[in-house]
Structures are given as C-alpha cells and as structure tokens.
Amino acid sequence: MATEQETERGRFTITQSQRDRIARFVRKFRSNTKAMLGFSIVVMLVLVAIFAPIIAPYPIDATNIEDRSQAPSVEHPFGTDDLGRDIFSRVVMGSRISLYVGFGAISGALAVGAVVGVVAGYAGGLTDEILMRVMDAAMAFPPVLLALTLLVVLGPDLSNVIIALAFVYTPYIARVSRSAALAERNEAYVEAAIARGESDSRIVFSEVFPNCMAPMLVQGSLNVSFAILAEASLSFLGLGAQPPRPSWGLMINTGRGFMETAPWMLLFPALAIGIAVVGFNMLGDGLRDVLDPKVEAIE
Amino acid sequence: MQENGKGSDSSDSTGDGTRRSRFDRRTFLGAAATTGAVALAGCTGGGSDDSTTEDSGSTDEGGDTESTDTTAASGGKQGGTLQWGGAVPVQGLDPHIDTSAASKRVLENIYEEVVALQDDYSIQPHLAESMEQSDDNTLLTFNLRQGVTFHNGKEMTSEDVLASYERVQNGDYLATGFFDYVEELRAPDDYTFEVQLTEPFAPFLAKMATAELSVMPAENAEKDMVEEPIGTGPYVFESREIETSFTMSRNEDYWGASDEDGPFIDTIVKSEVPDPSVRLQSFLAGEYDFINGIAPKDVSRVEQAPDVRFEKQFPKSLVYLGLNCDVAPFDNKDARLALDYTIDKEKVAEAALYGTGQTTASPATPGSPWVNPDIEPRPRDLDKAQEHLDAAGMSDGFTATFKIPQSYPTQVQAAEVIAADAAEVGINLEIQQITWSTWLSDVYSNRDFQATTSSYLALWYPDVSFYKFLHPNGAFFFTNWVNEDYNALVEEARTIYDEQERADLYHQATEILHEERAGHLFLWWQPSLYGAASQYKGDIGAPDGSTLQFGDNWLDR
Amino acid sequence: MSMYNYVFRRVGFMAVTLFFVTLIAFAVTNILPGDVALLILGPNATEQSLEALQTQLGLNRPLYVQYIDWVVGLLQGNMGESLRFGEPVAQLIAERLPRSMMLAVAATLVAVVLSVPLGVYAAVNQNEAPDVSASMFAFVGISMPIFLWGLVFILVFAVWLNLFPTGGYVSPSEDLVGSLTRLVLPAGAMGFALTAYIMRMTRSSMLEVLSEEYINLARAKGMSQRVIVLRHALKNAIIPVITVIAFQFSYAFGGVVVLEEVFFWPGIGRLTLTAIQSRDIPLIQGCILVVALIYMFSNFAADLLYAYFDPRIRYGGDD
C-alpha cells in the first residue's frame, strides 16, 4: 500500500505531497478508459435519479387498464405494463431505488466493515482471529441466500433490504481493510506514533484508518454493483421492494409472467440493471487500476 | 386456497374454504332444504363483464362424481397414461387432516365418502345405496353398498365407516368440531351405519360429502396420520416424489366401474409444475394432456391455440378485501365506506382476471337463491368517498398497511390498482407482499393487519358463505366485524327449511353486510381454468368447483 | 511454513468457521417470525393442541438446548424432520442436492468449453480485435447477474426461438432427452456468466506463459504456433485456470437459489426458498448449512489448489 511519500508526510495538514498524489490520481484516472467510462455511467445514473421526476413523462402509479401491455411506441418508448403504466417512467424512477439501496447498503457495510477490519488488522492476535473467523463464517453463505434469510426475519421492506445487504457485505469490506491495516501497521509513521505514546484508538482512527481508504473505496464501489444486483434478486423473489414501487427487480419479476406477450416488461428493466452494474463494475475496476494495481478486491 | 398462484404458493395448505369448521350453534335443517337445488350450470361465463368465452365447450359442468354420474359419458376408451401438469404441489395425503385443494385434487380420486355432492349441489348417497332421515332429522341411517373393496383388497363394511368417523370424532381433525352435535355413531350390522345427532344440525350431511369425512380402512383409521392413502375410489395411489410428481393408477376392482363411466385411464401422472408460464408452455408444446391453474392473463393464448380444449369452471373462489374492524382506521365505518367508494370493482376485476371473473356484493354463490339481487357493489364515487372521510374525521385521508399473499399475482395486481385508486383521496395503502405462512400467522391468526386480500373456496353451501367467515363464532372469522342483527339472521337461517324463507334471511343479512360495510369487501368470483389436449375426453372438474375427478375421463389416442 | 502446516492451519480455521456457521444458521432461523405449530395445525388450531405440538416439536425448550440438540443430531447425521413435508431433512436434501450439482457441474462444463478456447484465442491475438471483443464480452458477462442471463436465455431460446422448454425438471432416468433439453438453458445461462472469469484467467495466464523463455526457445526451434500454444503453453497456463474454475464452482453454487427459481429447477435452492417461505425451521437450517458447506468447501479446495500451484503464496501469511 504505502507509497514512497507517505512515510514522510505530515499528519494533519494537506502537504504538497498529498496534493501531488491527488493530482496524480486525477491524471491517472482520466487516462484510464475503463474508469472514465464507469464514472460517466455512474454520473449519468445519478443525474437520472436526481432528475427522475422531471424526466419521467407519466405518473408511475397511475393504472390504465385500457392501455395495458402496449408495445413500445412514441407515447410509451418502453411500452406499458400489465396495469397500463408507462415502463419508461417506471424504469427512470426505479434508478432511485437501485442507487438508494446500492449506496445505502455499502455505506453501512463500509462503516461497520472498516472499523472491524482496521481494528482486527491493527490489534492482531486473538481479537483479529475472532473477528475474522466471524467474518469468514458470514462469508461462507452465498450472499443472496444470507440476505434472503435475514429479510424473512426483518420483513420485506426496502430499508430492511439495505440493512440485510449491509450485513452481507460487511465482511468483504472488513477483509480488505484488515489487509490494508495490517500493512499500515508496520509502517514507520505508526511506529513513530506508538513511540510518541499516542493511544491505540487515536492511532487507529487518525493514522491507520485514512490510509486504508483506497482499497476500501475500490471494494466499496465494486460492492455497490453487487448490492444493486442483490436488491434486484431479492425484489425478484418478492422480499425486497414492494409494489407498486418501481424497483427494477420487481418489474422483472412481474415481467417474467408476460414474456410471451409483452417482453418489453422484462427487457427494459433488465437492461437498466445491466447498465448500472456494468457502470459500477467498471468504475471499481478502473479505480483499482488507478489507485494501486496490487490491491486485491474480492469479487 | 386458489390456484392462480404463480407457484410459490406451495405452502398454502389451509387458506381455503375447506378448512376445519366448527359449528358452534344450533339446529339442523332437513337435508332437502339444506342441499337445495341450486342448479348452477357450472360455467356461466364471466358475468357482467362478459367474457363470452368462444372457447371449445367451456360450459363444462364440472365433472361428475364417479358412478352416480348421470350425464352421458358415452363410453370411453380404456388405457393410456394421462400426463397432467399440475399447479400447486400435492401436500399431505391424509384427507381428514389436509386442507389444501392441491391434495384434494388427487385424494378425491382415491378416497370416497358415504354421500357425495352433485353438480346441482344436492347431496346423494355414494358409498351408501340409500339413506334415510328420521322425521325429527336427528337420526341419519345409511345402507352401505355391498362389494365395495378398499385398494388393499379388503371389503368395506360399516366397521370401517364407523372407525373413520370415530377417528375424526375422537381426534383433532378438520371436522372434529361437527361431532359436538353427534350423540352416537352406530354400526348395527355390516352394511348399516347410523348417525344419531343431539339436535337437528343441517351442516352435518353437507360435511359428510367432503373429504374431511372420507372413508378409510379401520386399521388406517387407527393411525394419527395416514401417509399412504388407501381408499375405495377409482384410482389407487402409486407413488409420489414431493414437489416433483404424484402417480395414481386405475383401480381394477372399482365397485362402480362400468363401460360408460370408467374409470378408463390406466395411469395418471401429475407433474408438479408450479409456474403457470412454464406449465402453459409445456402444455402447448404437447408435453401434458391436461393442465389446471391457467393464469387469467393467458386465457386468450389458450383459446387461440389450435387443438386445445379450454375449460372454465365457474365459480371456484371468492376473493375479498379484508379490513380489520378492530383497529384504526378501519374500525371506523366511514373509513371503510370511504375506501369502498374509491374502488372501481369492475376495473379491479378486469385488471386481475382479464374478463374471466365477476364482481359481487354477496358471499353467496352466483346464481344461487341466496344472492340478494338488489345489492350491487358500490360504484366508484370520489365525492362520496370524501364525504365519508370527512365524517370519519380524516378529511386528508389516512395510511394503512395492505398485506397481500405474494403467491397470488392476481391479488397483487388487484392490490396495486386498489392502492392507486385509493391514493386519489389520500387513502394511502402500503402494499406488503407476504408469504402464505406469514398471512396465516399474522393476518389470520393474530389478526395483526389493517387491510389484506385473500380468498375462500368451496362456498357451495350457504352456511359456509354467511356463517363460517362472517359470524364471530364461525371458524374463519378474522376481520372482527360484529353485528348482532346480522348474527341473529344467519343463526336463524340455519334453522329454516323453506328455501324462500331461508333465502330471505340471507338477503337481509347481505343488506347489513353492505350497509355496515362489513370487514369483508367482496371483490370478485373467479373460475377454475383448465387446458386439455384434444385427445383428452370427458368432463373436467368436480362439483365443488375446485377439485378434480378423473373417473369418467379418457384418452383418445 | 510447509504446505502441510498450511493445510492444517486452514482446516483449523475451517472448523472454527464451521462453528460460527452453525451458530448463524441456528440463530437466524430461530428468530424467524411465524409460529411453526400454527402453520402445521392450520389457523383453527386450539391453544391446547398448539401447545401440545410445540412441546412435541421441542419448540418451547431453551434455545441453547435446542442448539446443542441440533448440533449433536448433525454430528450423527440427523438433521431433523421437515415440519412441512414430514420427511427427514437429510432425505429431502439428498433428493435435491444431486439436481443442483447436476446444474452446477453442467454450468461449469459449459463455462470451461466456452472460455478456455476463447481465452487462448484472445491471448494469442493480444490487443487485436478478437482480444478486445472477448474482453468486452467477459466484462458484460461478469456484470450481468446470473438470473438475468437466465431470463434473457428463456426469452430468446425458449419464447422466441422455441428451441427449449422454459423450465422445469425431468429426471434423467425417466426421460434422458427431456431432462437434457431442460438442462441446456439453466446450465447455459449460468455457464455463460461463469465464462467471463475463466476466460479472463485463461487469457492472462496464457499471456504470462507465452512470454516465458522456453516458449521463445520453442519458437526459435521452428515449432509451429499451433503446437506451441496447444501442447506447451496451454499445459502450463491451465493450472491457475483450474483454481479459478474451482472458485467459480462455488460461485455457481451460490447462484443456484435465484437461478433455480428462474428455471423452476427443483434443486436445493428452491427447496431453501420453499423452506423459508413456509418457516420450516429444520429444513431452513439444513439447507443453508449444506449450501454454506458446499460453498465453503469448494472455496477451500480452490484455496488449496491455488496455494499448491502458486509458489508466491506465503503459507501462513494472512489469509
């Protein structure tokens, strides 16, 4: 992890070297096609989500049985669903749900996972062993299965999806941040801090932690795409977002029953998921290349 | 339980109208009166929204009970294997315990009862040659058929009937509650079976026609739970693989066998194909001779398919919106009325059923004399809805959770339309899809809900419609709507012999249901929908509208 | 640290992990809402019969007693009896597991058949059109979830082209052709999703090998490109690929829950869903435990292979 400048930089102010680092990062990021492409897709998604109510031409809940299951047309570019709702509007509004869940769950996982990982990595010994074995156990379940089981306990609801997915992805973040913390621990600046007699918690949170951010961000951005997918899967199984919310997974679930007669009900939300996931994956991949090619994210 | 489910409803075993019933009160009606000729010719099409199914022979009168069959099944071809693509997987195999329609669909062919329901909803002797009822209606005497053998080769005698009934009486089975009205069960000789009631109690005979009082060999009746069904029916249980397949074969020694009425088919293999799309596609590809549980949205595809027979048996079940009258906001009659006025029932039924159903304001079977012809579902009227909201002191509307069993796409569709409509006056119904088991425990048992949807099956008997789920002592009561006038009416109806007089009471009761906006807001009646290949002959279905009897079906290959 | 020590240590870790896995499986299922006794008896059960059944099922004992009983049972190969099916959980799982295995194995086969040649081809034509398009393909493959591939496959191959059934399962012993035609789409969809990873790995591994000395030597000797690639390079490049395949198998297995639902494939994934939906606690416990075990062991096997083949791994380093 540690680059040549880190050992000599000051602790509390942004030094020249840090500014250099940021500039270098931006430069590298810009020249990385994958990162830029992913970044553009993500920015576009965020913009769509923010301006969704303006973009969407129809109210998303207004049913209109006469116009049910209409093929794509000028009026309804993505067609209408089984209750006559405009699919384009619903897909556009659905971006909010996907991003909300994706970012929400991963922020939660980052918050918990980073603390667990950094503490484990820094403390080492028994604390490390216990924490990491618990994380291993949680990782021993296929993610969707674990989230599913948790959701049955918590009840089907979007905020519960976020909680369940945050729980599921915590160990992934924890693992990565632990490795990073482990590496940092042996750095000179940490030893210097110890020598200065600083408390462990201070060292962890103001020294080690900030330096573990890069790999966590990479892992986090990859995991956002997993979380978006997982939300779709859970909603597809009926345990995530509830109707009439325009969750992409839920729309796919309904659309599945109409594949023969109205395939657009399935195709457009599926396409939306594909684009979102490809976007975050590219961004994550690109970030990994840019920040440090040696960072091993867990896929 | 109903079968429009997309298939994950394999767990819904007890949600239907055939669950255990406890009649806590009163009086017996003469068999003639209770089983009154309701003469409902099976399929009456889609009612007001008129589905005018131009399909091939959808006016099927729902199958016939094996041998008492009177409609001409004009001799079928013997042999062959029927490949049946089944909707909901077969559940338990003990007829006295299991309540799922899916299990009944196979058990109806394996087990038989002393009396049987007919297409005109009358009850006729079946395993009995004749029956007599004493003048005071408390003694029922059945002369059992001779020469009826169980699938294990043993002859059926009154001892087996007695053992089967005593099993239910002394155990904790679906029909156990009915035996509160039984003073004694007797088997004076090998072919006579008597039921001595404590007082006249009409529903007993109707219950005798259901699988809850199927006749099993005495040695099986000793078991707490029967896992290998042995009955007297036209088909013999062969094997099953849970949630994969279920196989029955022709009973070579069936007592009622004849060249006219079968049984004809050698083997019936039910493949469990819970998803309606997969089932339909496989059927259209020729993999199955027969499928049940066609999704309403697919009806037009089946109708248009060449060489396919589409069958509709109406009515099968009643779907309703359940409102909890014990908790806010629906403890307030005006809140219930406000919601009622926001719903466009025709639109809701159309959205879910694609013209295969019929809206209703009565729990009584459409076409029966028990339906009050003057009462119609409330039309959508947002001004009136607002008036009632004002009267309820909730002028800005209110919010309530809306728990929907997710295995029923039609109910989910309906819920979405209802929620969107209600939102226009500020009534915010938050849909929550729940599994069937959660519905049973949370909504039904703990009554922890504000609004929900569900359905009832097998409402051919008016007491089931009016008492079982709308009277506080009824076995299915759960919406907490209590009205003493209503209760008095439906209690009295159980004691009335005269059909007209009885119908009058039910009409008055329906009026109260409507005026007071009872906790059950009826949405629609829906049919059973079947598809059969051209080589599959004979009437499909059973008189109760939801199960299947294959006795007189045959394959023309 | 030697390989043996490494394996030993990993097995030790696994045992501890396993303990936590049983704990999680037990804990999660025991806070499920919904009364099992009520579910069995139906909504009109009396209080007494409910209590009697709860006692009979042991549901009213302290949780830790239930846990210990359960673990002891597990060690004896007894996973309890399914509340819904009334059959031993082990038997139900034994019935379904082979079907899921069949799917996962077929998917892995599909993936290998597709990805290895593609990867080799991409590596040989590095940075040229075939390589770039293969990389794009791989990326899209990775990004789309398995269940979406499943749905797209159904739409294209079953609904539009009408080549295969949309789903369902037929036992191969009953109808081999019917069984295989039903296997094609789910295995294809899953295999397609797995292809991407394996292809990527094959490509980079091939690239690495192709730059080695001995390959250059072979070239200098005038061996044909074909012989070099197929006989020499691939043989060496395949080792890391095998480990990736092992990883992918576990990934495939994790994906079966949703995929089986998409294709109505009655394997352990659907069994788990059914169990969850009907609050069949012993069955849920059994299913998630078995799935977790398979997931864990195939990951473990992959780790070992990886460690065995890759000298860069420091045995005993952080895992």
Image (cartoon, coloured by chain):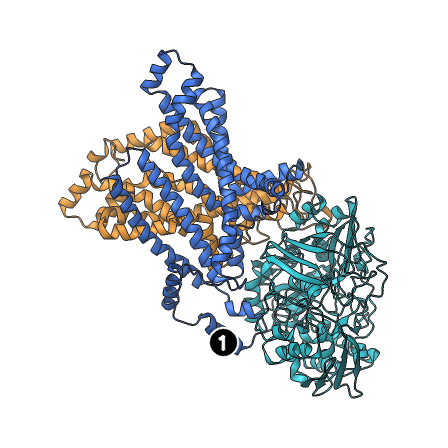
Colour of the chain lettered A: orange
Colour of the chain lettered C: blue
Q: Where is residue B98 shown, x and y percent of the image?
A: 62, 68
Q: Is residue A162 left or right of residue B330?
A: left
Q: Where is residue C202 shown, x and y percent of the image?
A: 42, 29
Note whether residue A279 is visible: yes
Give the residue displayed 77% in from the left and 44% down from the top.
Answer: B305
Q: Is residue C2 left or right of residue B498?
A: left
Q: Where is residue B254 shown, x and y percent of the image?
A: 75, 65
Q: Foreground: B160 or C30?
A: B160
Tell me the subunit letter for badge 1.
Answer: C
Mark 1, residue position: C52
Mark 1 neighbour class, 10 Å CA radius: few under 14, some 14 to 19, many 20 or more? few
Chain given the colour cyan: B
Give the residue displayed 69% in from the left and 46% down from the top.
Answer: B287
Q: Is residue B115 left or right of residue B477?
A: right
Q: Is residue C180 left or right of residue B470?
A: left
